[in-house]
Image: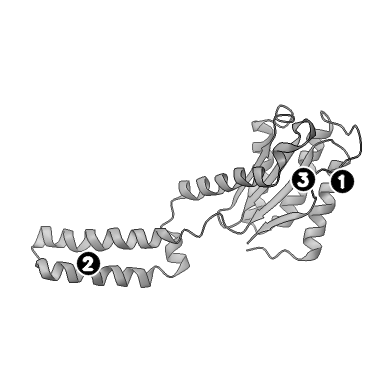
Amino acid sequence: MTPFNEYDQRQIAEAIARAERRTDAELVTVLARRADDYAYLPLLWAAVLALAVPGLLQLVLGWPGMRGLLVANVLVFIGLCLLLRNPRLAGWLIPRALRRWRASSLARQQFREQNLQRTTAATGVLIFVSEAERHVEILVDQGVERYLDASARAAIVGRFAEQVRQGRTVQGFVECIEACGEALSQHVPPTHTRNELPNRLVILD
């Protein structure tokens, strides 16, 4: 995971301040280390395999017997639980679609929790990153949605996601903020000085 020191966080806060001087939009940045710990998945896989493997052997080979089958179920379950305590091994069992869904759900939750839906003229913009899932998302309120539409957001997100994969998350945030500010300054220029939401990076550990 990318370590974020005070200097890194100040860079992001200053980038937000610069962008907001050019537009009435309110930008908020959120970094989640992970969207979920997925602790239940290794247990689920261990339980399924502990039932399936000895059961399949018993069905095909007639071994082990019924008493041995119960013992095998328990031993396989315990063995897999110990084996899957390794985070790398456990990570292979997490479907990509589930990772994406959990990260996207957390982004929408943060949009609400950071009060982006309550800005004047509905100009809230959330820039969200979940590092473990390498998921980047930009959510916008209805007041700026037509000026920063899905295709424009996808282009910005694509560049940012590549920087996250390369471990350049701080630079990705700064460039993403600048790109959003540039796009919105043309259509939602500043009409008065205000700062409804904090400029700091919100970090969810």
User: Residue 86 vs residue 177: left or right?
Assistant: left
Could you say where residue 111 lies in the image, as x and y percent from the top left?
66, 43
Tag 1 and tag 3, C-beta contact below 8 Å: no
Question: How far, Cα to Cα, is label 2 from label 1?
Answer: 61 Å
Residue 49 lies in quadrant: bottom left
Question: How far, Cα to Cα, is label 1 from label 3?
Answer: 9 Å
* Type of the residue with mark 1: Arg
Q: How crowded is mark 2: few (under 14 residues within 10 Å), some or many (20 or more)?
A: many
Foreground of the two, 12 or 203: 203
Q: Earlier in the sequence, mark 1 or mark 3?
A: 1
Number of numbered discs: 3
Q: Please, what secondary structure does the residue beneath circle 3 have? A: helix
Q: Residues within 10 Å of mark 1 (few under 14, many from 20)?
A: some
Could you say where residue 162 lies in the image, as x and y percent from the top left?
64, 50
Answer yes or no: is residue 106 visible.
yes
List the residue tagged with mark 3. 177
Q: Please, what secondary structure does the residue beneath circle 2 have? A: helix
Q: In this view, does 72 lie above or below 131?
A: below
Task: Tell us which disc is closer to us: 2 or 3.
Answer: 2
Could you say where residue 200 lies in the image, as x and y percent from the top left?
78, 54
Q: Is residue 48 above or below residue 137?
A: below
Q: What residue is at 44 percent from the left and 70 percent from the top? A: 86
Residue 73 has which mark? 2
Q: How crowded is mark 3: few (under 14 residues within 10 Å), some or many (20 or more)?
A: many
* Type of the residue with mark 3: Ile
User: Residue 89 vs residue 6: left or right?
Assistant: left
Could you say where residue 21 lies in the image, as x and y percent from the top left?
89, 41
Q: Earlier in the sequence, mark 2 or mark 1?
A: 1
List the residue tagged with mark 1. 18
Q: What residue is at 64 percent from the left and 37 percent from the top? A: 154
